Image (cartoon, rainbow, N blue to C red):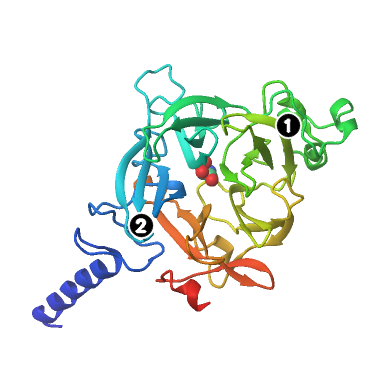
C-alpha cells in the first residue's frame, strides 16, 4: 500500500468513528447509540452512572453517579436535563459530597444508584441512593435520602437507614421469629445455607439494627404510594418496603422477594395493571444474565419470567447491568431499559445501554440495537 493510500484510510477511520461515536458541540443526536460515548451539550461524555430519570413538564432529569477513575464518590450525584432523551445538558451536581470528614456523605464514601421521586403532598423532590461509609468497603449497606425544592437541586442530605429495624416482613412465618432453622450467619456459605437463609437467618440477625440495603430503586405507584426496593441479606434477597407519606422514611410494611435469589440492580415499571421488574445476578462489576419478574402488586408475589435478553450476548445482558426502566412520555406502552456497561478499570468511561422494551408472549424482552430512535415505539 502506498503512503497516500494508508494515510487516506487512517483519516477515514478517524472521521467515521467520530461520526458514529460522537457529536461536537453543535451537532445534535437524533438516535440512541447503545455502548458508544454519549456526549452532553458541552461535548463531554455523560457522567451519570447507575442512574434514574424523573420527568416533569416536558423535561426529563437524569440523575446518576459522578464517577472518576475509581468507584468512590468524589463529587456526588450529577443531574442532566433533556427534552428529547437524546440530547442532554449538564445541570450540575444535585447532591454534593461533603468536606466534613464526619459526614456520612464525605468525599470517599460510596454513593450509588440515585433515584428521584416527587412528593405531591410536601412539594419536595426526594432522592434516595445506596450509601457506603468511607473506608468501610461495602459493609455499611445503608440507603440514604436527601430532599430539594427543585428537580436540579441542590439536594439536602437528611440521613441514612438500615431499613425496617424492629419490624418483621409480612411474608415471614411465625415460627421463624422464635425457632430458627439452624444456619450460622458467620458461616453462611455452607450447604445448609439456603434453607437457613430462606427461613430468615439474616432477617433475624439484623432485626434490631435494621436490614441491609445495597443496590436499590424507588417507585411511586399509581395511588401515590412509594416503595423502596433493595438488595438485602448479604445481597441474597430483595426487600420491598412501603415508604411513609412524605417518602422520607419506612412505614414498617415490607416483604422479602426471592430469598437466596441473589438479585441486584432492581428496575421496575407498570403496564396495563401488571408490574414488571428486571434485575441482574450478583457478580460485582461483571455482567451476568438479567432476570425478569411480574406481579399484580408492587408488594408481590413476584413470578419469575426468566432472562429478558435475547440474541447474541444475551447471557451477559449485552455486557450491562440494569438501573432503571423509563416510561416514555406521550407514547403508549413505551419503556426504555436503561443499563450500565461498567468499566471498573476506568469508571468514568462506563457506557450506557438504552434499549426499548419489546414483548414476547406477554413477557418484556430486550434485543440489541446498534442504533435506534423513539419512532421504534410507533412502528412496533
Ligand atoms: C454491583 C452493583 O450493582 C453496583 O451498583 C456496585 O455496587 C457493584 N456491584 C460493586 O461491586
Q: In the orientation shown, which residue stands out farthest toward the left?
A: 4
Image coords of residue 148 (percent x, y) = 42, 32
Q: Residue at x 38, y 29 (%)?
A: 97
Q: What is the C-alpha distance between the residues marked 2 and 1?
A: 51 Å
Residue 69, picture quadrant: top left
The picture places residue 213, in percent across and down from the top left corner, at 61, 34
Q: What is the secondary structure assignment of the residue under circle 1?
A: helix
Work out whether residue 45 can be spotted: yes
Q: Is residue 134 visible?
A: no
Is 221 displayed left or right of 41 in the figure? right
For mark 1, does the 10 Å Cα neighbourhood hold few (<14), some (14 to 19), or many (20 or more) residues? few
Residue 253 point in image, percent of width and height: 73, 34
Residue annotated with mark 1: 187
Q: Quadrant of the N terminus?
A: bottom left
Residue placed furthest toward the front: 121
Q: What residue sits right under mark 2 in the picture?
A: 83
Q: Quadrant of residue 352?
A: bottom left
Residue 249 percent coordinates (x, y): 60, 29
Q: Is residue 38 above or below residue 133?
A: below
Amino acid at each position: 500500500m502506498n503512503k497516500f493510500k494508508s494515510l487516506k484510510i487512517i483519516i477515514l477511520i478517524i472521521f467515521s468513528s467520530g461520526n458514529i461515536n460522537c457529536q461536537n458541540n453543535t451537532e445534535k443526536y437524533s438516535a440512541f447509540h447503545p455502548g458508544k460515548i454519549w456526549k452532553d451539550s458541552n461535548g463531554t461524555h455523560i457522567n451519570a452512572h447507575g442512574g434514574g430519570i424523573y420527568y416533569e413538564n416536558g423535561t426529563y432529569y437524569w440523575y446518576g453517579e459522578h464517577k472518576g477513575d475509581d468507584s468512590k464518590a468524589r463529587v456526588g450525584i450529577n443531574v442532566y436535563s433533556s427534552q428529547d432523551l437524546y440530547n442532554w445538558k449538564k445541570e450540575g451536581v444535585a447532591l454534593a459530597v461533603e468536606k466534613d470528614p464526619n459526614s456520612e456523605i464525605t468525599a470517599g464514601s460510596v454513593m450509588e444508584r440515585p433515584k428521584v421521586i416527587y412528593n405531591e403532598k410536601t412539594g419536595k423532590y426526594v432522592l434516595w441512593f445506596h450509601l457506603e461509609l468511607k473506608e468501610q468497603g461495602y459493609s455499611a449497606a445503608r440507603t440514604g435520602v436527601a430532599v430539594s425544592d427543585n428537580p436540579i437541586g441542590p439536594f439536602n442530605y437528611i440521613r441514612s437507614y438500615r431499613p425496617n429495624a424492629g419490624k418483621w416482613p409480612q411474608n415471614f412465618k411465625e415460627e421463624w421469629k422464635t425457632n430458627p432453622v439452624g444456619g450460622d450467619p458467620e458461616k453462611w456459605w455452607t450447604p445448609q445455607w439456603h434453607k437457613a437463609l430462606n427461613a430468615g437467618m439474616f432477617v433475624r440477625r439484623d432485626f434490631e439494627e435494621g436490614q441491609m440495603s445495597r443496590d436499590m430503586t424507588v417507585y411511586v405507584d399509581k395511588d401515590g404510594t412509594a416503595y423502596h426496593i433493595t438488595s438485602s441479606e448479604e445481597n441474597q434477597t430483595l426487600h420491598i418496603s412501603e415508604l411513609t407519606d412524605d417518602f422520607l422514611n419506612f412505614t414498617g410494611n415490607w416483604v422479602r422477594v426471592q430469598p437466596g435469589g441473589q438479585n441486584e440492580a432492581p428496575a421496575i415499571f407498570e403496564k396495563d395493571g401488571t408490574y414488571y421488574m428486571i434485575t441482574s445476578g450478583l457478580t460485582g462489576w461483571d455482567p451476568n444474565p438479567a432476570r425478569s419478574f411480574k406481579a399484580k402488586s408492587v408488594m408481590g408475589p413476584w413470578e419469575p419470567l426468566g432472562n429478558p435478553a435475547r440474541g447474541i450476548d444475551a447471557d451477559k445482558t449485552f455486557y450491562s447491568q440494569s438501573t432503571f426502566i423509563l416510561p416514555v412520555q406521550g407514547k403508549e406502552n413505551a419503556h426504555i431499559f436503561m443499563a450500565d456497561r461498567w468499566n471498573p478499570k476506568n469508571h468514568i468511561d462506563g457506557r450506557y445501554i438504552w434499549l426499548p422494551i419489546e414483548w414476547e408472549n406477554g413477557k418484556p424482552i430486550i434485543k440489541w440495537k446498534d442504533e435506534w430512535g423513539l419512532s421504534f415505539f410507533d412502528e412496533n
